[in-house]
Amino acid sequence: MSKNIVIACIVFASVFSACESMQTYKYVKLTIPKGASIAIIIDAKNEVKNTIIAKFMEKGLRVKAVNASDLYTVSDHFLIKDYKKLAYEKSEIVLGSSEDSLNSIQKSYDSIYKLHIYSYEANKAEMLSEMKSKWGIKYIILLEMNDWEHLCWARTIDLDSNEVIGIENYQTKYSDKVGDVIDHFIESLVAM
């Protein structure tokens, strides 16, 4: 009987934490000043991007032409897990399933993974610095609108300090219009 109670508690805690993470939350340390030069990073269809960009431009912000694809190189497409999968498949085909070869492959994977993780922070800092100095961008706005029926979120970053200056989780409904959601984020994150 106690086993069922434990399972029920785990299920309840999982559902509760999932629901809690879907709640509206907002913290804005600083708003983006009107007339500021911004980049909006969002993964969306072009017609959605156009609506979003137009809304920010209507509010007096200078939107720079930056796409998410500008922020990575071809080598970024090759994920570490792909190396691991390939290594294990090769080991089964070529080397058999000997324990020594799997240990050697695991060590190789660990080395590649560590190199990737250690250089990630340096690469991120370099990209943000380049966006500021070469592209003249003062603020980045990250938008996520893929979970449309539940939650959209926005995050703003000040490139002078690389500090997150505003975040918001905003509950949306399927019937919400893109323009209305963007207007909400602009009112929250931009000084009017």
Image (cartoon, rainbow, N blue to C red):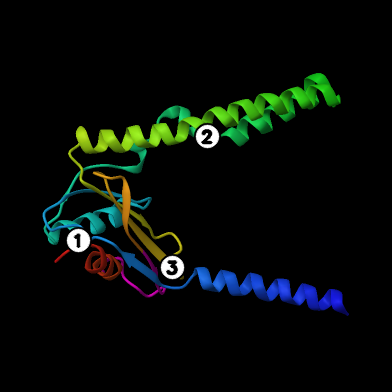
The reply, left or right, for residue 99 in relation to residue 55 is right
Q: How far apart are marks 3 and 1 (CA)?
A: 20 Å
Mark 3 surroundings within 10 Å by alpha-carbon count, few (fewer than 14), some (14 through 19), many (20 or more): some
Q: What stretch is highlighted in magenta?
A: 168-179
The residue where tag 2 is placed is 117
| Viewer-proximal residue among 183 and 24 | 24
The residue where tag 3 is placed is 151
Residue shown at 52%/31% (left/top)?
A: 116
Screen quadrant of the N terminus: bottom right
Mark 1 surroundings within 10 Å by alpha-carbon count, few (fewer than 14), some (14 through 19), many (20 or more): some
The residue where tag 1 is placed is 55
Which is more N-terminal, label 2 or label 3?
A: 2
Q: Identify which amino acid the numbered label 1 is placed on.
A: Lys
* Cβ atoms at labels 3 and 1 below 8 Å apart: no
Q: In this view, does 77 lie above or below 185?
A: above
Q: Residue 83 carries which label?
A: none
